[in-house]
Image (cartoon, helix red, strand yellow):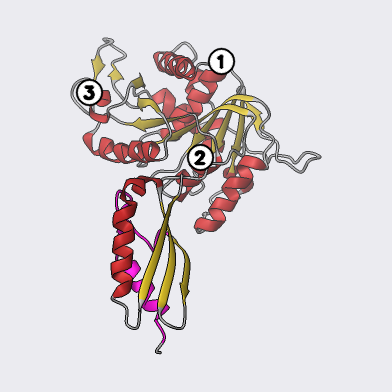
Amino acid sequence: MAKVSRIEIYEKLDRIIIPEANVSLVKYKGIRGLEIDKDGNVDIRIEVPKQAEGKTDKIKKDVENAIKTVENVKSVNVTVSVNEKPYGTVEFKNLIPQVKFPILIGSGKGGVGKSTVSTNLAIALSRHGYKVGLLDADFYGPSIPMMFGIKKEPVVNEKEKLIPIEKHGVSVMSLGFLLEDDTPVIWRGPLLMKALNQFLEDVEWGNLDFLLIDLPPGTGDIQISLAQNVKVKGAIAVTTPQDVALLDVKKAISMFEKLNIPVMGVVENMSYFVCHNCGTKHYIFSGNEMDTGDKLGVPVLGRIPIDTSIREGGDRGLPVVVAYPDSDVSRAFMDTAKIIAGKSGL
């Protein structure tokens, strides 16, 4: 008797979409065993994800009917089992178990002042009495070293781990410490992931209350890898009060939610300008206070005003919370940090 084509069977099964999971049996890698005897009798074992546990009879019938259309098949026996994990479940690790509350800080787009917010919030949390670390995970454009005014390289301890550089009460680590000035980063995904994991498990972070992780713009591999390798307790989105910025921030929030990372809220940067002469608030971007929280569906943790002191502090390596601790801007960062700490429960 002519042989049954295994390839043709796989092609047929690749057209069967698993209900509720929206993925084909082949792409899901749900074929756990396929035996074909010399007479054309097919014995196949199928595994489906948790979402489809109520649809196993339908899947079994679909598989049986599909295989019967393959030439030279005499009979089909289908066994279906259900995986306890839903399709799309991320396998989480925790490379920094000594950190109580890791927080991802993202924006979905560049130019909203995410690194400035991360820097000043880290210092503000430290000034509230917490042990704080800051990881610059924006490997394509590491700017945290400049904002902290750090120009030295980290040292390695006896356990061959990098020791973060301490400044302004914060333990700081960045790829920028290890690069020459103006050196472009042109690594591809796998190499970036390897570097990222090293900055997690090969750094002597110590026992921290908070580790703020400053993400690169977008919703790519670095964000997903961090979610897989750190037991992230929360995420904060940074935006400016513009509809065009909110569109990208919505994508970042959606990514956090899909990865089951609780979104603590949003920080609205460049929220308003206070006239130094009359003390009036001017909402430069939106004309009036924007309903950012309602538009994004998350709480507003803080609104940071526009002030030249923020830009000056970032450029000369002296963040505004340090340089002008009594300013309205610093108080806004301190108040926002207090809200974040309150939400953490620490």
Q: CA distance from mark 1 to mark 2?
A: 22 Å
Q: Residues within 10 Å of mark 2 (few under 14, many from 20)?
A: many
Q: Are marks 1 and 3 in contact (CB under 8 Å)?
A: no
Toward which corner of the image does residue 296 lie, by quadrant? top left
Q: Which residue is mark 1?
A: 127
- The reply to whether discs 2 and 3 touch (Cβ–Cβ < 8 Å) is no
Please state which amino acid type lies under the numbered disc 3: Asp
Q: Which residue is mark 2?
A: 143
Earlier residue among tags 2 and 3: 2
Outermost residue, left direction? 287
Find out whether the residues at labels 1 and 2 contact each other: C-beta distance under 8 Å.
Answer: no
User: Is residue 142 something one can see in this rendering?
Assistant: no
Q: Secondary structure at mark 3?
A: loop
- Is residue 253 visible in the rendered structure shown here? yes
In the image, taking residue 117 as reference, residue 14 lies left or right, namely left
| Residue 15 on image: x %, y % | 29, 66
Crowd band around label 3 with a 10 angstrom C-alpha radius: few (<14), some (14–19), many (20+): few
Query: Which of the 4 image quarters holds residue 281?
Result: top left
User: In this picture, is 66 found above or below 260?
Assistant: below
Query: Is residue 14 rendered magenta in the image?
Result: yes
- Image mark for residue 262: none
Measure the C-alpha gap from mark 1 to mark 3.
30 Å
Q: Nearer the viewer, residue 133 or 48?
A: 48
Where residue 185 appears, as percent x and y from the top left, is 52, 54
Q: Earlier in the sequence, mark 1 or mark 3?
A: 1
Position of 123 compared to 115: left or right?
Answer: right
Query: Taking 279 as reference, is 114 above or below it?
Result: below
For the record, the magenta segment spans 3-28
Snapshot quadrant of residue 1: bottom left
Q: Which residue is mark 3?
A: 291
Q: Amino acid at mark 2?
A: Ser
| Residue at 46% over, 50% down | 221
